[in-house]
Structures are given as structure tokens and as C-alpha cells.
Image (cartoon, helix red, strand yellow):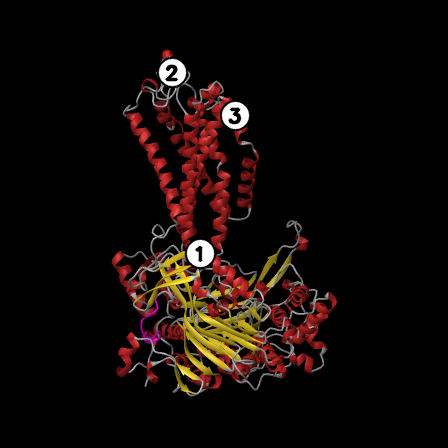
Amino acid sequence: MKRYSQTTGEVGESSDLSPWKTADALDLVYVGYGLLIVVLVLVSYVLGAFTWLPYDPEQIRVDLLNAPPGSAGHLLGTDFLGRDILSRLIVGIQAYFLPGLLAIVISLLLGTTLGALAGYRSGEVETLVTYFNNLVDSFPRLVLILLVIAAFKPGIYYIMVVVGVTGVPAVASLIAGKIEFLAQKNFIEAAHVLGLPSRVILLKHILWHHCMPLLVIQATIGMGEAILIETSLSYLGFGVQEPTPSWGNMVQAGANYFFQGKFWPSTAPALSILFTILGFHLLGDGLNGILEGSAGK
Amino acid sequence: MILEVTNLRKHYRQRAGIFPALRSRERFIPAVDGVSFCLEEHETVGLVGESGCGKTTIGRAILRLTPATSGRIVFDGHDITAMSARELRPLRSQMQMIFQDLDAALNPKMRVRAILAEAITTHHRLSDGEVARRIGELLEQVNLKASKLSNFPRELAGGEKRRVGIARALAVGAHFIVADEPTSALDVSIQAQVVNLLRDLQRQLGLSYLFISHDLEVVQLISRRVAVMYLGKIVEMGLADRIARAARHPYTHLLWSALVEGQSKEASHAPLNTRTGAWEPFDFERPVSGCRFAPRCPVYEARGRPAVCTDAATEPQLHDIGGRHYVAGHFPV
Amino acid sequence: MGAPLLEIENLRTYFHSRSKRAFIRAVDGVTMVIARGETLSVVGESGSGKSVTALSIMGLLDAGPGVISGKITFRTDGGERNLLHDLEHYVTLGEQDGRIMEVSKDEAGWRKQVERIMAEVRGKEIAMIFQNPKSALNPFVTVGHQITEAIRLHTPTKHPREAKERSLYWLERVKMDSPRLRFDNYPYGLSGGMCQRAMIAMALSSEPALLIADEPTTGLDATIQSTIVGLLAELKSELGIATLLISHDIRVVSRLADDVAVMYGGTVVEYGPAPEILGARFGLKHPYTAALLASRPSAQNVEEKGGLPAIEGEVPDPIDVPRGCRFYARCNRVTEDIRDACARHEPALKELTPGHHVRCWLYGD
């Protein structure tokens, strides 16, 4: 049985309800969960800034190596150097968030610019952008990152610049496709006929009105990706370097003890990674469903 | 003379095969193939023809939405055929277009107020108060309720969308408007409103229209002169009443008889159009030499397929038959 | 003649708008009758519910809640059937001041039920042709093959060669130019007019009892339109097949229809023999019908280059159906005596002359 109902009162002249009011319940749950993760990240910064942590995340306790959760006031236990896992977990996200934002800003700015160039000025420019995209896309991302690390030094910001640049093609082709689709539309032609300069049409009618939700969604996905990349690099030993905690190097360090039955040092950060990436992806998914899905009645 | 189009051609390039670089396989589709006409001030010229005859392409070429392949378009004394976008911009305030598609013509993410305000401020720097006053004026001109200003286009009914489109064209101060099928997407009861509105605006503001439509009755009602197009060419042009009543080209006859026939049950077997069932999609790659209408022409059949009709050297050209009436045909009816 | 072929009683088909949290009352209590061998034409503007009525008959609605009440009696040689049999078991309606405000429907169950009822009706006893013939034909299968398949599926002719002969017969019947050649064509090789002919051939090949033609000429060029209308007129007189013709084009309707139903805002406002409804006597008509007929350019106003007598206002929004007469807001014939009734109460269909019904307070008691 499916129920449909009409709210009483006049419906005629009123405009549509906002997309948030009529959104799918599931999409709202997604967005809510995603926002919760974002809030938790911000909370972690506050806690870190005021050092309101249970313990100093880098304090080594030789007497408490790999202590199980709950022992001696360590809620999630300690790691192989006796450092408090909860404190490291809280601070650990900070290894990603700002670098991740950098990666997102790079890929969105560069991607939008290239996409706009390709979509709006077809011909030679489009071919050039396509070649650039293909070049970047055909290069294995990890190899590129390793090359950069070899050339400079293992630093999360170097890595994230590469992540940002390698994220450009996806954004560029998305934007270029959208622009090509919109350029056929009468309302863009009408704007040209009105005599608006191309730059205004591109910035206002195309990017601002029709690409914003797309970019926000792309940003959330980019954040999830940045975390994932750092984790894989940590596993290779090239991620955030000890003693600075990151979830990636925590999993890596803890994994050595996993088969000795000491699962907690790696499980806690692994789950954190899982739920955080899920959060960002669901945020993107939910926003997509609500903002983009609202176009049709 | 507000608009003068001379020998306008527009060929679309169609790439064939998987190697676009091999130009030899490229096909050129002549959407508009040498069209000349002019439009005087405060005049409405109707452009009729069936889908694919190139009438919309002419409108788009005049507004430079698509570059012309060759020919000359002179608007208000300026040759705009090869003007740069920058040079053209000031002229944009004088020529506008009403688009056929109601929904695609308005930015779906902008409210009506923003759409109008944008058009008003495109060519003039105005204060908010002046913009608001101008919006009020436009609303009155197109007879739209002020409560609609805060609506998005999708929340409007068909006729209201059309009114917003017209108001936008007026907002920049245009006095020449290309109206591309302005009524075809509308309901019958709304069509009459829009036709009346366009006529009233013409009278009040002294507008000139190029009225593109396949609706012969509406064109006849609103236009002073009518040009009939067939496959990229004008085959007949003249005063609306003469085209309707004393058409000379067999194709014009066919168009009008389809209409008259609809009005009476009895005339359902007019001899002129018994063969239209066999019309195939026109193959631009193997164009008929000579008269393009010959393969479908009842006169061509009736006269025993004279050779002059399919002789490439004698493609009929528009010629004056008196009373500003032009026909392109070997055997005017 | 006997009992009519198809009888629609009080059909209601609603959809639901998420963004307005309201019902789209697309078809709101439609009653009409199609006699054997006659053409009933449904005339109306966008949003009047004419196409939704056709889709409701065919059970081809995807969006919910869809058909929520009514009865469609279909009488063939095989007996009498209600195409909405047992609908009330799947739907519960909640009313508030005489207006449906809540619907609960077991959609999956109803879908199954519709498929059970319609399996032997759709395409076989009721065939349909659509507005856009190109998209209604399968682009990857030749026209001839599609018709042959339809024949083998719906008629006793099962042998491939016989079925092919039969489909060639139908292609000839619809005056397809060189049918043997066209038989092996794919739809993209045919013009719009030829595709529509192929669609008609396919629809007729299963020898249905009822043909539903939804805007069969809209979107075709004027010259092609008139030949298709001519073909339909010819087939009608030769085959005598009952037809439900849906169109907004009064010219097409006046050539083909025996009876006309004028729809406005989801209901039938006028219903009767075509000559009476489309004829020149404007007096005895629903004000909407009269205004609609007058709003097309006529010889007279073209002559005078005068304005058109337009109907003011907009086509009603099926979300916001007025309480009183649906045409009240745009009507120019409201008199002071009936104004109150027009605004508050919806008039019933009244029989003016035998067979001619009008839903208007002007023709009150």
C-alpha cells in the first residue's frame, strides 16, 4: 500500500516547496550523516587546538604497550608505543582535512577553468584540453605521487597537490559536458541575443546557475578520495610520517600486531576511515538527490 | 528598410565516416540556399514552410546565432554579416528573438524578476528603482500579473512563459523581433491571446516582425507580406491576401489546399495531393537538378514531366509577376 | 446497434506532485461512450486529461497513484468486461468536503491485476497509435517484421509466410507507397508520414474492436497531415472500426468524428454529435466550446485584419481545480443570475437535445 495525501488549503498560486522540504527521507539521512562527519572533523580541530584530549597523542608509555581498550583510562587502548589511541584518532583526521581541501580546491578550480575553456571555445582549445586530460588520466596516480615524493620529500601537501591535479580531468570533462549541453539550450542563445558578453553568460548562467551543485558534489567525493589515497600511501610508508598521527599510519602500524590478537590499534582507525569516507560520499549522494533531482517535478 | 537579406546561404557540414579529417567525405546540407528578402519598418513578414525548409535557420542567421555561409544581412543600415561579437553588441538592443520552445527559452534557475532585470540592465545602467519601474511597465505591456515575478519559469503556465519571453525581448528596447513559431507550442485558446498581444505591441511600439510559422491562417492574419519556403528557397512571395487567394506556385497551392480541405468533409480527395503519401525524407546528397519541387509537383506530373523542370541549367528563380508578387516556377498555376 | 462498445463511467486518474504535496487531478470524473463503428473524438487543450484518459483505458500509466476510481465496460463478441475490475479492492480514498485528499493504493497488486486483464485486450482488441510514430516503432527492426510479429501475436494467422502476406496487405491498405520495398525498411529510412502509415497498419493488422488514436497528425507537416486524415477517413468508412480519436486540432476532428467530447480541466464539459458541437450555431453550446471555435482565425477576421476573439486567462492547472465550474474564471457568458452557482458548484452534464450533453449552469432548469 502506498499512501498519497494532499495538504489542506489552497495550492494554486503558491510556488513549489523548496527541494529540502520534499526531499526523499533517505537523501536527508545521507546528508545528515555526512554533515555529522563534517561537524566531528571540526570538533576535532577545536579539541586539538585547546588540547582537550584525554592524553597527549605523541606521549610514549613503555609500560602500556598495546594495552586493550578500557585499560587504565585508555578508552580505546594504546598502540605499540603505548600512545593513547583515542587521542591519536581525534587528531588523526587533521592530517587529511586541510590537505584534502587543498586537493579539492586545485581540482575544482583547474578543472572548471579547463572544462569551461573546452566547452565554450571548441576547436583547438578543446583538443588541447582533451589531450591534457588523457595524459593525466593515463598516468597511474600512485606512480605519479611516488615520483613527486622521490623528487621532493614525503609530505602530505606534495601528495595532495598531485591528487588535486590528477582530479582535474574528471571535473573538466564534467563541466565541459554540461556546458556543451547547455549551449544548445535556447536560454543561453537568448542571453547571447540580449547582448550579454560571453564571459557573463559563462560565469552567471552556466557556472553559477547550473554547475554549482555539481561542484559541491564533486568536492565531497574528492574529500573521500583524498583520505583513501593517504591511507594507501601510509601503507607504503610514504604518507604522513610518524610521530604525527594519521589514520593511515595508525592502521599500518597496528596491522603488525593484528595477527597476534591485538586488533584494536588498527581496527579503530580503519573503522574511522570507513565511516568518514562513507560520510563524504553519502553527503555528495544525498545532495545530488536533493538538488539535482529537484529539477523534475 | 530595417532588414535586407541578400542571397543568404547556410550550409551545414555533416561529417560522414569515422575519419573526420578526410574532408572528401564531408557532406554539405544546404539548409538555406540563396534567399533574398527585405523587411520595412513596422511591417510583418511571414515566413511559412514545412519543417526542415530552413525558415528557422534564416531567423537564427539574422540574429547571428549561426554564421551565414555566404550572402549579406543588412540591419538598419549596418552590414552585420561579418561583424564581431563586440561590434554587434550595441545592435543587439534593437533586434531580439522569441523562441519556439517555451521551456528552453527561459533559464530554469532564474526567477521571472531576475530574467527581466537582466535584460533591462544589459544595455543600460539603471538604478534599482528604475529597473523596478521598467519591470512594472513591461508587465503591463505584456499583460502579466505582478505576482508571477517571484516564480520560476517551471511554475508558469504556457501563455505566461510566452509573455515573459516577449517581455524580455521588449526589455532591451528591440524594435525588430524574429518570432520563431511563437504560437505553435501553445494551446489553441492561448494562441489567440498571443497573436493579439503581438499585434497590439506592434501598433503601440512600432515593432517589425519576421514571423516564422507553419500555421498558415495565423501568418495570413498577422502578416502584411508572406514568403513561402520550400527546401531552402523562397518559392513565392507577396502580399498575404494574394498569397492566400491567388497563389501561383503549385507548392503554395498544395499548402493552402491542405488547409481548406480540412474545413469541409466533402473535399477530402483533392487531386493535388494524392501523391504526398509517397514523400520520402529529402536526400540532400542527391539533390534534384533543376526545380526542387519537381519530384512532388502535381503540375510536373500533369504536364507529362517536361524536361525543363529537371534541367540543372534552368532552376527557376523568383521573378516579379506584378503587384509585388514574386514566383519561382516554370509553370505558375 | 445494441449496447455500446466501450463505456467509461466516472473515471478518475490522479497523479501526485511531490514538490507541491498535492494531487494532480488529471482525469476527474470522466464519463463517455463509444458506440460500435463510430468515431468519438476527444477535444481538449494540454492538461485537459484527454491523453491520460486514453492511457487509463489501455492501463499504461506508470506514475502513481494512477487510476483511482471508475468503471470501463468493454463489450466484444466474447462478452462484457470491466477493464477496471476489482479496482476498489486496491484503492482506498479519503475524502474531505467532497474532495479526495488522500489515496492509498496497492500499486504492485494493481499492476498485476491490470496486466491480467489487459494481456488479451491490449494491442489485440484495443490498438493504439501515438503522436510520435518514429519513437513508437522499434528502430532496430524492419517495419515489415514488426507488423508481421504483431499479426502472429494477435491474430489466428501464425504461419510466417501467411503473416507476411497479411502485413503486405495492410501496408497496401494504408496506401504505403511501394509496400514491398518499404516492408524491409527500418523506421529511420521513412518519413514521418510513412511511419504513421506503418503504425496505422500495425494497429489495424490485429483487427481490433477499438482503435485509440492519440494526436495522430500532430507534429506532421500540414500537407502530410491532411493525407493522414484522409486515410483515416477512408479506413473508417471501409472498415467501420470504432475509434477514439484524441486531438487538439478541431479541423482534424471535424473531418473524422461522429461524436465529440470536449474536455476541460479533467472533465467532459460537452458531449454530443459532431455537427451539433462543431457546427456554426454558437448559441446552444458550452461557452468554452464556443469560445474555442471562435478563437481560430476565420475568413472573416483575416479579411478585416482584426484581433482574434481570445479566451482570457490560462489553461487550468490540474493541481488547483476550482470548486465550482472549471471554466468559470475564463468564461465570458456568466450572467448575474448564475454567477453564484458557477463559482460554488460544479454543474452536472445535462442533456439539451437528444444525445447532446452540456455541463453548464446556463442551461439550468
Q: Earlier in the sequence, mark 3 or mark 1?
A: 3
- Amino acid carrying label 2: it is Gly
Q: Amino acid at mark 1?
A: Ile
Residue that carries the numbered disc 3 in the rendered image: A146
Give the SS element for disc 3: helix
* In the rendered image, residues at marks 3 and 1 fall on the same chain: yes
Chain letter, disc 3 residue: A
- The picture quadrant where one finds residue B110 is bottom left
Q: Residue at x 42, y 19 (%)?
A: A242
Image coordinates of residue C117 in percent, x first then y, are 54, 65
Looking at marks 2 and 1 on the same chain, the residue that comes earlier in the sequence is marked by 2
Q: Please state which of the two labelled residues, at mark 2 or mark 1, is closer to the viewer.
A: 2
Nearer to us of marks 3 and 1 is 3
Residue A82, numbered label: 2
User: Which secondary structure, mark 2?
Assistant: loop
**Label 2 lies in what chain?**
A
Question: What is the x, y in percent for residue B325?
Answer: 54, 80
Coordinates of residue B278 in the picture (x, y in percent): 66, 73
Q: Residues within 10 Å of mark 2 (few under 14, many from 20)?
A: many
Q: Are marks 2 and 1 on the same chain?
A: yes
Q: Position of residue C265 (x, y in %)?
A: 39, 71
Magenta-highlighted residues: C320-328
- Quadrant location of the N terminus of chain A in the rendered image: bottom left
